[in-house]
Amino acid sequence: MSISRDEFDPLAAIVDWLDACRRGDLNALLDLYDERAVMECGCEGVTLTGRNSIAAYWAPKLESKRVTAFNLDAVVLTGHGVQIDYQNYEGKPVRFYFRFGSSNEIIYTSCGPLIGRAAKISPN
C-alpha cells in the first residue's frame, strides 16, 4: 500500500524499525532505509553509507541481541525527524535520531550512548 507524504507517520516507522530489530529481521530493517542512507554511530565511532554497509553493521548485532534489547524508553518528534531512547542490542541505553526522505524511508540516523539523560551525539 502506498502512502502519500501527507499521510506518512514517522512514529509508525519507528515502531516498524524497533519491531524488525526485536525479531532480528535484517531484511525488514533494511527495507526501511533509503538506498543511500547515512548512519553515524557515536557508540562505535563509525559512519556508514548505503544499505550494504548498514546491513554489515546490523547483521551481527541482531544475531547476538539480548532479551532486553530494543525496549523503548522514550520517543520524541523533533523538528527534523524522530528521537528515541532505547536499549541497544546489548541492553545498554542509547539515543537514536532518525530523519526521513521524501520517499518516507530513513535517510539519516545518528546514535550515541546515553549518559544520564544526555547523549554524546547531535541530531545534525
Image: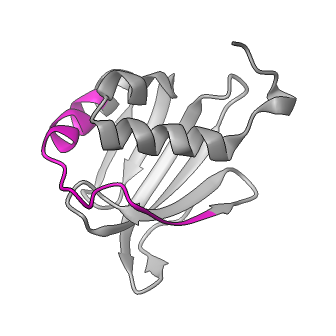
State which region is magenta. 55-75
Residue, x 35% and y 41% (percent of image)?
21
Is residue 98 visible in this depiction of the protein? yes
Residue 11, percent from left and from top:
65, 47
Residue, x 20% and y 60% (percent of image)?
90
Residue 116 to residue 123: above or below: below
Q: Is residue 65 magenta?
A: yes
Residue 34, percent from left and from top:
53, 24
Residue 95 to residue 39: above or below: below
Q: Can you say which quadrant of the picture contains the N terminus? A: top right
- Judged left or right of residue 100, residue 30 is left
Residue 54, percent from left and from top:
33, 32
Residue, x 31% and y 28% (percent of image)?
26
Residue, x 51% and y 37% (percent of image)?
16
As drawn, the residue found furthest toward the right would be: 6
Coloring basis for residues: one colour
- Judged left or right of residue 85, residue 76 is right
Q: Is residue 33 magenta?
A: no
